[in-house]
Image (spheres, helix red, strand yellow):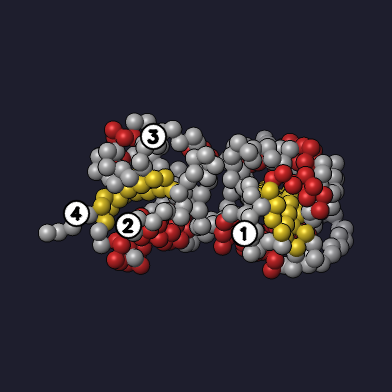
Amino acid sequence: MPIKKIHVHIENARKKASIFHITQELWDAACLRHRTLARNLSVTIGWDGDMLETALKTAGMVIGVPPRRDDLRKRAPCLRWLHATSAGVDGLMPLDWLPRGVVFTNNRGAHGGKAEQYMRMALTMLNTRMPELIANQHRHHWQQLFSPDIAGKTTLIVGLGDLGEGAARAARQLGMKVIGVRRSARKSRFADSVHSYARLDALLPKADFLVLAVPLTAQTRNLLDRRRLDLLKPTAGVINIARAPVADYDALCDKLRRGELAGAVLDVVEPEPLPSGSPLWDTPNLVITPHISCDDGERYIDISLDLWFEDLARLLDGKPLKRRVNPKLGY
């Protein structure tokens, strides 16, 4: 008797960059890499809800959070697993829309490698005073700005998940001391020491570079406020690869304009895209990148689907999923 296949529905949004689109070709390639797991799956691939309601009637698993999430239990009676193709799920909280018994996972683990490369660039850029050098070039102004060796300096990383550990590896490769801060003081093999949020104020004055790599939750919103920015030394640099509301950007820009910080690199802003009239564009010694720090431009979906298949194997074996979102923590 043939085994009934599990219906997997993939929901794409055309407004997202193409690197986040799961096409039939990319799905087929992933199935070839995971033949044993894939043989019991059937797939439908939709775009902007064009077939969503029909697919939800029989889908046991959905990759890509539906834009409309009300009454999911009725619309998707067979649903057992819903997977978000991003790591950050703050925009989906609270999970009061998620039907009881449905497992919700995010894309944790897909970003660390690229984050590591970006952070090597960002740390080196700030140490070399590149934002100021670029500004001088645009002004046709010749000024020799000499910088010290980055080795031996201290990077303070707030958040030691996939992104934070990528940042820690980058800092270690550059010969830097790494101090980590996260919800618990649990050790990390990539940091020289790890502390809880309660120690953040005492650690900020030690930082040559401050890296924000935390998920956005009630605890981390405005974590780097004006008071904490004042605890940083004027030679420090700030890098945010987390979410914009984690930091007070108005206060950050004020300090940059007054020369009370050496520079900043922001990969996240609010809103996105950043409006042309935003004062961030013209803030001195600030580099803005358009939320591209941690996503592999060629292999993002390949990496993501491999992680999904890894959790599928765990699900079929009755094991806890590695990327399950904890609604109490917000990630």
Q: Residue placed at 29% from the left, 47% from the top?
A: 60
Q: Tell me the kind of residue under disc 3.
A: Arg
- Where is residue 271 shown, x and y percent of the image? 59, 37
Q: Please name the residue that numbered disc 4 is placed on.
A: 4
3D distance between C-alphas at marks 3 and 1: 33 Å
Q: Which residue is mark 2?
A: 316
Q: Is residue 93 above or below residue 188?
A: above
Q: Earlier in the sequence, mark 3 or mark 1?
A: 3
Disc 3 from disc 4: Cα separation: 27 Å
**Residue at screen point 27% across, 56% down:** 41
The answer to whether residue 189 is left or right of residue 331 is right
Q: Quadrant of residue 224?
A: top right
Q: CA distance from mark 2 to mark 4?
A: 14 Å
x and y percentages locating residue 180 in the rendered image: 69, 55
Viewer-nearest of labels 3 and 1?
Answer: 1
- Mark 3–mark 2 Cα distance, whole angstroms, equals 26 Å
**Which numbered disc flags the more N-terminal residue, 3 or 2?**
3
Q: Residue at x 25, y 52 (%)?
A: 6
Front residue of 26/314: it is: 314
Q: Is residue 157 left or right of residue 258?
A: left
- For disc 1, the marked residue is 165
Disc assigned to residue 69: 3
What amino acid type should be assigned to the residue bearing mark 2?
Answer: Leu
| 303 versus 198 height, above or below | below
For marks 4 and 1, give the CA distance.
Answer: 41 Å
As measured in the structure, the alpha-carbon distance from the residue carrying label 1 to the one carrying label 2 is 29 Å
The answer to whether mark 3 and mark 2 are in CB contact below 8 A is: no
Considering only order in the chain, which callout, 2 or 1, is on the residue closer to the N terminus?
1
Dot 4 falls on a residue whose secondary structure is loop
Q: Residue 174: x percent and y percent?
A: 72, 67
